[in-house]
Image (cartoon, grey):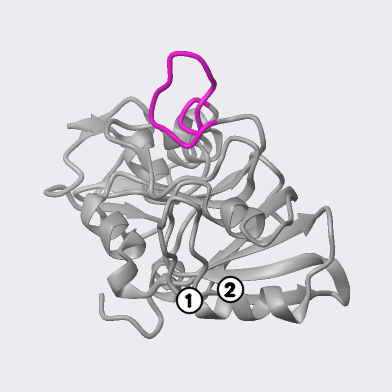
């Protein structure tokens, strides 16, 4: 049993303030009865919850898009640094949340936060070939030789070999690259460029699969993924 406002927020009906306003105005029913108290307890799976007559199709898990800011770590908890879970709006917080994959502390952009382990595994497994795209600003120019090295698969100094990746010059700026990879080794994009004699000055992830970072989402902002958003991640993949 959970508060009715918490249930509705978890399903993307609105922010906590918006949901509470809708409840108090009589827009929400539970088993046909109008509920006007946000603290009313309901069973999300068994009770028939409706908003303006439209029955809520409750989803057990939550899927959040974050435009991750620099300076926070991609972890559920950390003893030294602020985490992406720490900066989530209260209405999105629930037990078991974790970032699906990680972005370096100083890397910005698209990050998915969820409590669905199976979903995260499918999204992150190299075998699923879910592409991730990054915009990398560099301290030197991209050459055709470097592009070919990415295409062949970069090999790090310790012998670790990356899967073939795509590198393109972004916006006709040879110091800015659009990188597409389908795996997520530790500091991978930075290490790939270091192996080619370049350093990454700024890094932003802009897409996972065919899901792109919402251009209207401010740095540090969050939004719930729709069912279509989730499908876009796995376009061309069986999920």
> From the image, which quarter does the N terminus lie in?
top left
**Closer to us: 95 or 9:** 95
Q: Is residue 135 above or below residue 92?
A: below
Cα separation, mark 1 vs mark 2, equals: 6 Å
* Residue holding disc 1: 164
Q: Is residue 55 above or below residue 46?
A: below
In the rendered image, residue 79, in percent from the top left (x then y), is placed at 43, 14
Categorize mark 2 by other alpha carbons within 10 Å: few (<14), some (14-19), many (20+): many
- Kindly give the residue lying farthest to the top in the view shown: 79
For image coordinates 26% across by 80% down, the residue present is: 238
- What is the number of the mark on residue 150? 2
- For the question of whether residue 57 can be seen, the reply is no
- What is the number of the mark on residue 7? none
Q: Which segment did they paint magenta?
A: 73-86
- Kindly give the residue lying farthest to the bottom in the view shown: 236
Q: Is residue 158 above or below residue 229?
A: above
Q: Are marks 1 and 2 in contact (CB under 8 Å)?
A: yes
In the rendered image, residue 68, in percent from the top left (x then y), is placed at 60, 43
In the rendered image, residue 84, in percent from the top left (x then y), is placed at 51, 33
In the rendered image, residue 11, in percent from the top left (x then y), is placed at 37, 50
Q: Is residue 237 magenta?
A: no
Answer with the quarter of the image where residue 161 lies: bottom left
- Kindly give the residue lying farthest to the left in the view shown: 46
> From the image, which quarter does the C terminus lie in?
bottom left
């Amino acid at each position: 049993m959970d508060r009715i406002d918490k249930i509705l927020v978890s399903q993307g009906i609105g922010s906590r303030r918006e949901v509470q306003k809708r409840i108090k105005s009589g827009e929400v029913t539970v088993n046909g009865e109008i509920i006007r108290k946000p603290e009313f307890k309901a069973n999300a799976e068994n009770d028939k919850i409706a908003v303006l007559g439209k029955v809520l199709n409750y989803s057990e898990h939550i899927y959040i898009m974050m435009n991750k800011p620099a300076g926070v770590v991609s972890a559920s908890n950390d003893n030294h640094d602020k985490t992406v879970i720490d900066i989530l709006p209260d209405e999105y917080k629930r037990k078991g949340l974790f970032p699906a994959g990680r972005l370096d502390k100083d890397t910005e952009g698209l990050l998915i936060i969820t409590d669905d382990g199976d979903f995260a595994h499918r999204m992150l497994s190299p075998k699923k070939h879910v592409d991730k795209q990054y915009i990398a600003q560099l301290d030197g120019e991209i050459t055709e030789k470097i592009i070919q090295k990415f295409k062949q698969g970069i090999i790090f100094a310790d012998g670790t070999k990356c899967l073939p990746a795509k590198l393109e010059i972004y916006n006709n700026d040879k110091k800015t690259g659009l990188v597409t990879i389908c795996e997520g080794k530790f500091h991978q994009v930075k290490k790939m460029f270091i192996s080619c004699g370049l350093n990454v000055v700024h890094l932003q992830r802009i897409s996972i699969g065919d899901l792109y970072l919402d251009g209207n989402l401010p740095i540090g902002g969050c939004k719930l993924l729709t069912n279509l958003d989730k499908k876009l991640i796995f376009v061309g993949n069986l999920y």
